[in-house]
Amino acid sequence: MPSPDPIAEGSAIDPRSLPETVLAAREPVVLRGLVSHWPLVEAARSAETAIDYLKRFDHGGMPVTATVAAPGEGGRVFYNADFTGFNFRREQVPLAVALETLRKYLGDASAPSIYVASTTIDTFLPGFRAENDLDLAPREPLASIWFGNRSRIAAHQDLPQNLACVAVGRRRVTLFPPDQLANLYIGPIDATPAGQAVSLVDFAAPDLKRFPRFAEAMRHAQAAELAPGDAVLIPSMWWHHMEGLEAFNVLVNYWWRDAPAWMDTPMNTLMYALMTIRDLPPAQRAIWQEVFRHYVFEPGEATADHIPPHARGVLAPFDEARVRDLRARLLQRINR
């Protein structure tokens, strides 16, 4: 099976002024040492020290959600064998308890997998960003933190742009362009391990008899191993498989969309289209394919130029007020 190509690496970049060519990139890029100046990265020379550093910002309020899988799962966060559920359990625990549990297992080669997924930094670790942050202005990204021990997170997509910064431990990331959807054998889209549909291929032991097209996906793969201080820009909708390689790993993500905040997620549209279009007779489905091309994917002069501007309704450019009105009308129709 082909080995992935290395992810392209950016030249030396001032973390105080990230260029637009990076933030708006449509191809992934590794930024070595981007956050090496963070105090948490400096503390990462020792897992114990890094844990102590994070605990400084714990306000002891709301619990975090810890994902726990048995040692025999090898850190893989996934479905159970017959797809009736998952191979892990979720526990609500204080942040300090999660960190101390990870400390307890630092030297244990047979430790369970413990993984605290995307947790909003400003809510759970107030003050952390005053010492460990990036200025991405004019964007106002959501900053989240992930921490745990060795883990394997199945390949999935995220809608926002994602600047993922490794603060503690080493992490291996394997990326695929969006057009590899069919070759990654994506599982259910409405019952997922963590909110996003995931590849069913076990990257540690790919079963090419069951998933033969995965070999083609690997011809398009890009990968990198990231050390503390390194970051990777994962463009919107690129598939990414993430592995935490150490007994304690911390990842900080910055998420933003290159679209107004009032725009809804296209995933809602996909779900509704599955319900209303997919199972139509082929001839009718082809008609709706043309309708979507005309109005959504290739709008042009023939779409609305013949309508007076004041009468174009939803065919006119959207703004927050028009979206709010349309959403209200759609909800009324759906709930009839």
Image: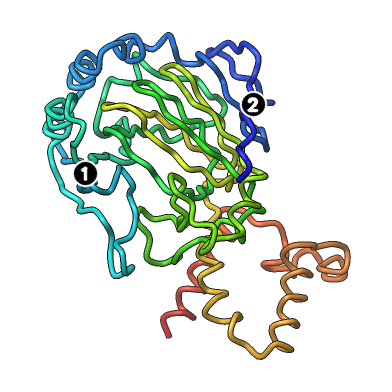
- Residue under the image location 58 percent in, 54 percent down: 214
**Distance Cα–Cα, label 2 vs label 1:** 38 Å
Assign a secondary structure to mark 1.
helix
Give the left or right position of residue 67, taking residue 284 as reference.
Answer: left
Q: Position of residue 152 (x, y in %)?
A: 37, 42
Which one is nearer the viewer's eye here, 207 or 38?
207
User: Residue flagged by tag 2: what amino acid is it?
Assistant: Val
Q: The residue under label 1 is which amino acid type?
A: Pro
Residue picked out by circle 1? 71
116 vs 73, nearest the viewer:
73
Q: Name the residue rendered at 39%, 55% in the picture.
A: 195
Query: Relative to 130, does residue 210 appear above or below in the rendering?
Result: below
Residue 181 at x, y percent in the picture:
60, 57
Give residue 22's mark.
2
- Residue at left offset 46%, top offset 73%: 331
Classify mark 2: helix, strand or loop: helix
Badge 1: residue crowd in 10 Å (few <14, some 14–19, many ≥20)? some
